Amino acid sequence: MNAMQWFVQAAVAWAACAAPAAEWKVREKLDVAPVWAGHPVGFSLLTAGDWQYAAFYDAERRMTVAQRPLAGGPWRLQTLPSQVGWDSHNSVTMAVDERGGLHVSGNMHCVPLVYFRSRRPYDAASLERAAMVGREEDRVTYPAFVRGPRQELIFTYRHGRSGNGEQVLNVYDPAAQTWRRLLDEPLFSGGGKMNAYFRGPVRDAAGVFHVCWVWRNTPDCATNHDLSYARSRDLVHWQTSAGQPLTLPLTLATGEIVDPVPPGGGLLNGNTHIGFDGQGRVVIAYHKFDAAGKTQLFNARLEDGRWKPYQTSDWDYRWAFSGGGTIRGEIGFGPVTVQPDGSLTQSYHHITHGSGAWRLDAATLRPLGPAPRGDGLPRELGKVESPVPGMSVRFAHDLAETATDAAKAAAAKYVLRWETLPANRDRPHPGDPPPPSMLRLYVLEPPAPAGG
């Protein structure tokens, strides 16, 4: 299970149950296609130029890319030669390069690279299977496209398996239409004894990229340990929080440890987030067991050159997770976030304590009281429509990153919505699978200004 997949599952409950904020309004909703609903797996939405794309698994589990003009018009569907099984790791993601080339990758959990690139700019109908670098591509998991300091397109994935893997980064040359290694060495390496599950890179206002990660010794998720951190300005040269250079690959011995949580200490891959406080200091959110053995939310802040963990929650529940496969999220949270008025907030979801958001004390990072949820999604989107017991709502938010797309997002927000059964450790649920769910695009407009 990776961070993105767990967040997609858990964020549904936050949107449906958290205290309401000023909600965006539904301007339009557009059916995309019936989709597989037997288990959750990450879909993606991308707005680029004058086009919009949705990548998903259709009712027959086939990887599919739908394309529509933003100005209006029907979806055009392109089916790709890849079919998902029962594995919730196998999310599908997309990117568009500076020349309009569409890139799609997904449906991988320790299998050879699955990657498609369009022959023509902005044209999903011209997607075809393509090669990348040609090495360390036989056991790929967790594909992700990210943007470098000059908006260059970077592709990263884990090579290997849980407990024995390395993180690979490639960079794309749009003129030559070729990929090459961004780093001569992996970003993380467990030396055959462990692997890193990382969050990021998250870029701050000064242009610095931040990553945090946990190490995991085996496929058993209870063996996560040692929350760690590094930063970089170019994703090539890495430093500690004090600015000391780090030699790649980053290992348990060389990485900067934020909190030395031992194996079995309640730390979980996928449940870490990078945020910032009002002074721009890095705050890493995670959970671990407290002295009484209960699972608590902690926020570690970088203060005067050292990491100081703060216990934010005071829950009376122990999430005793273990084993392999995609587990159901019982506890989740977002990063510490600075609001326009300078206050700090943090969202959370708890299997017994409910969902919502807190206002945090700036000094202690303890809750001061409830806060509005941050997503502002209309509450109707969080209501399950299927009559099948156990179904849950899933969302995919727009991956758009360019300045043009950001300007458009001020006037409209785009969200994909569908419903599935929960994860079942990457195995079929008992009985027949549910009927397909309708994948819908919601076009949202911002709420009216206060007093307007």
Image: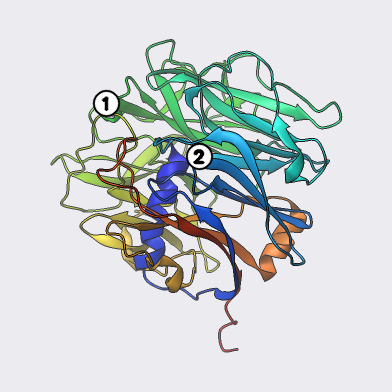
Q: Are marks 2 and 1 in contact (CB under 8 Å)?
A: no
- The earlier-in-sequence mark between 2 and 1 is 2
Q: Which residue is more in the foreground, 122 or 352? A: 122
The Cα–Cα distance between marks 2 and 1, rounded to whole angstroms, is 30 Å
Task: Report crowding for label 2: few under 14, some 14 to 19, many 20 or more residues within 10 A (C-alpha).
Answer: many
Marker disc for residue 65: none
Where does the image place residue 44, in percent across and percent down from the top left? 57, 48
Looking at this view, name the residue that lies furthest to the bottom: 451
> In this picture, is 84 found above or below 183?
below
Quarter of the image for residue 68 reads bottom right
Q: Identify the amino acid type marked 1.
A: Pro
Q: Which residue is more in the foreground, 410 or 41? A: 41
Viewer-nearest of labels 2 and 1? Answer: 2
Q: Which residue is more in the foreground, 34 or 309? A: 34
Task: Report crowding for label 1: few under 14, some 14 to 19, many 20 or more residues within 10 A (C-alpha).
Answer: some
x 67%, y 63%: residue: 409
> In this picture, is 319 found above or below 355?
above
Quarter of the image for residue 447 reads bottom right
Q: Is residue 404 left or right of residue 413?
A: right
Q: Tell me the SS state at disc 1.
A: loop
Q: Which residue is mark 1?
A: 262
Q: Which residue is mark 2?
A: 91
> In this picture, is 375 found above or below 67?
below
Where does the image place residue 61, in percent across and percent down from the top left? 49, 42
Give the quarter of the figure containing the N terminus: top left
Q: Identify the amino acid type marked 2.
A: Ser
Q: Which residue is more in the foreground, 335 or 342? A: 335
Q: Tell me the SS state at disc 2.
A: loop
Where does the image place residue 257, in percent across and percent down from the top left? 40, 27
Q: Is residue 203 visible?
A: no
Where does the image place residue 273, in percent across and percent down from the top left? 44, 44
Looking at this view, name the residue that lies furthest to the top: 192
